């Protein structure tokens, strides 16, 4: 299924749409089956309603049910301590119950943060990485629990 993307003044994201894997649930509903790179306010596991265009392509229409998962995008800096390694980012978050996938073309990692992950430690590591110049990150899809998390010391 596809998501239409709005570009900002700098031309980001670098595409007009993004395709995500999805599991057909019937009646125009699908469950997103991978972490989004650019689509906002959706995460793996969310149930969404689709519409079909004249070419038979499924397009996102609305989110019906949030999975509780968060989608976080991380861009490791080439001149940072991780030397731009996407795999190093994934390896740092894996012990905290977070999965991730890197994309070489854009030098970024899409992290899937399930609600049972150690959210204070995950958020604390993200903030630490920014303060130490390892990466920058963006919260693509979060919920109230994530927003209210106190950082781990």
Image (tube, rainbow, N blue to C red):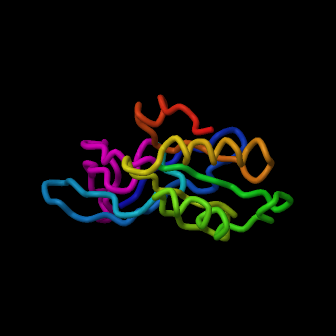
> Considering depth in this image, is 12 or 88 the residue closer to the camera?
88
Q: How many marks?
A: 0
Residue at the farthest right position: 79
Q: Residue at x 19, y 54 (%)?
A: 28
Residue 86 in the image, given as x and y percentages of width and height: 66, 67
> Considering depth in this image, is 65 or 17 the residue closer to the camera?
65
Residue 130 in the image, given as x and y percentages of width and height: 73, 44
Left or right of 82 on screen, residue 56: left
> Considering depth in this image, is 5 or 140 the residue closer to the camera?
140
Q: Is residue 94 magenta?
A: no
Q: Is residue 63 magenta?
A: yes
Q: Quadrant of the N terminus?
A: bottom left
Residue 21: image quadrant is: bottom left
> Considering depth in this image, is 135 or 91 the residue closer to the camera?
91
Compared with residue 21, is residue 49 higher up or lower down, i.e. above or below? above
Residue 113 in the image, given as x and y percentages of width and height: 45, 52
Q: Residue at x 17, y 60 (%)?
A: 25
Q: Residue at x 51, y 48 (%)?
A: 5
Residue 77 in the image, given as x and y percentages of width and height: 78, 57
Residue at the farthest front position: 153
Q: Quadrant of the C terminus?
A: top right
Residue at the farthest left position: 27
Q: Residue at x 28, y 49 (%)?
A: 48
**Span highlighted in magenta in the image:** 41-70
Left or right of 90 on screen, residue 117: left
């Amino acid at each position: 299924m596809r998501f239409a993307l709005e570009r900002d003044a700098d031309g980001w994201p670098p595409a007009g749409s993004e395709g995500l894997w999805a599991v057909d649930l019937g009646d125009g509903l699908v469950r997103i089956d991978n972490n989004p790179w650019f689509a906002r306010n959706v995460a793996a596991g969310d149930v969404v309603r689709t519409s079909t265009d004249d070419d038979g392509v499924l397009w996102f229409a609305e989110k019906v049910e949030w999975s509780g998962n968060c989608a976080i995008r991380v861009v490791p800096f080439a001149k940072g301590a991780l030397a731009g390694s996407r795999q190093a980012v994934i390896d740092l978050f894996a012990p905290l119950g977070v999965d991730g996938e890197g994309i070489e073309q854009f030098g970024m990692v899409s992290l899937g943060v399930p609600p049972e992950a150690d959210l204070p430690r995950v958020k604390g590591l993200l903030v630490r990485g920014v303060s130490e110049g390892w990466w920058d990150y963006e919260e693509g899809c979060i919920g109230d629990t994530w927003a209210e998390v106190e950082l781990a010391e």
